Amino acid sequence: MLEYVKVLLCMYPKMEAEIQEIGKRMEYRALRSYDHTISCEKIAEELLVMRDRAEAYREVRDKMESILKRMDKKCREALGFRFFKEPMPKNVTLRTVYRRSVRGVDRVAEGLEAAGFDKEWFFRYCGRDAEMMFRYRYYRSQTPRRARSAEPKVILRTNRCPERAVSLPGAERAEG
């Protein structure tokens, strides 16, 4: 459900470069418009779509920046490790960092949704970006596995003798 938030967090450090790239593409498209057989109206529409996308990226980048600044240091460090390739916080286990990053993703999602940056917004403005959609599909493919891993697991402890194996209700004893 929060895949789009994870994508935005991954892309956050690259947003400024992406905004500049869109600006360069707009300039190139405008300068090369005389070579094409496409009408001026069509080119103007393309330029407006590109401008809207750049503005949307600026707005979400600024909102994420303000959310991250308000977040406590521990969650911010965990998100930095998980999404921004920063070093792992010291004297903290990997499990703790993961839990803090999950809380951080939830807080970022709440802040973005409160500002109107929801899943629909993501697909409207980021749906044409190949890298963002690649990351979205990656996180989306990981969701069912995580959902399964969150289910309680039944571990059967068996001794060397199969007749002494313990079987719990709802679990099948491994034949070995």
Image (cartoon, rainbow, N blue to C red):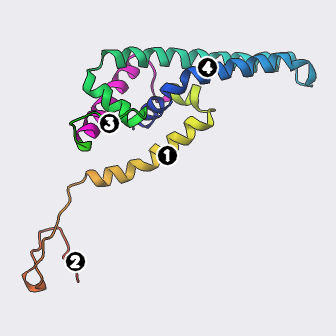
Q: From mark 1 to mark 4, how far is it between C-alphas?
A: 23 Å
Give the mark nearest the N terminus, 1 or 3: 3
Which of label 2 and label 4 is nearer to you? 4
Residue drawn at point x = 47 percent, y = 14 percent = 62
Residues rendered magenta in the picture: 96-120
Residue 91 on image: x %, y %: 21, 36
Quadrant location of the N terminus in the rendered image: top left
Residue at which label 4 appears = 19
> Which residue in the structure is indicated by mark 2?
174
Q: In percent of the image, x 42 and y 17: which residue is there?
A: 65
Give how far apart the Cα atoms at labels 3 and 2 are: 38 Å
Query: Which secondary structure lies at badge 1?
Result: helix
Residue indicated by mark 1:
138
Mark found first going from the N terminus, 1 or 4: 4
Marks counted in the figure total 4
Per the rendering, the mark at residue 88 is: 3
Q: Residues within 10 Å of mark 1 (few under 14, many from 20)?
A: few
Q: Is residue 142 left or right of residue 102?
A: right
Closer mark to the observer between disc 1 and disc 3: 3
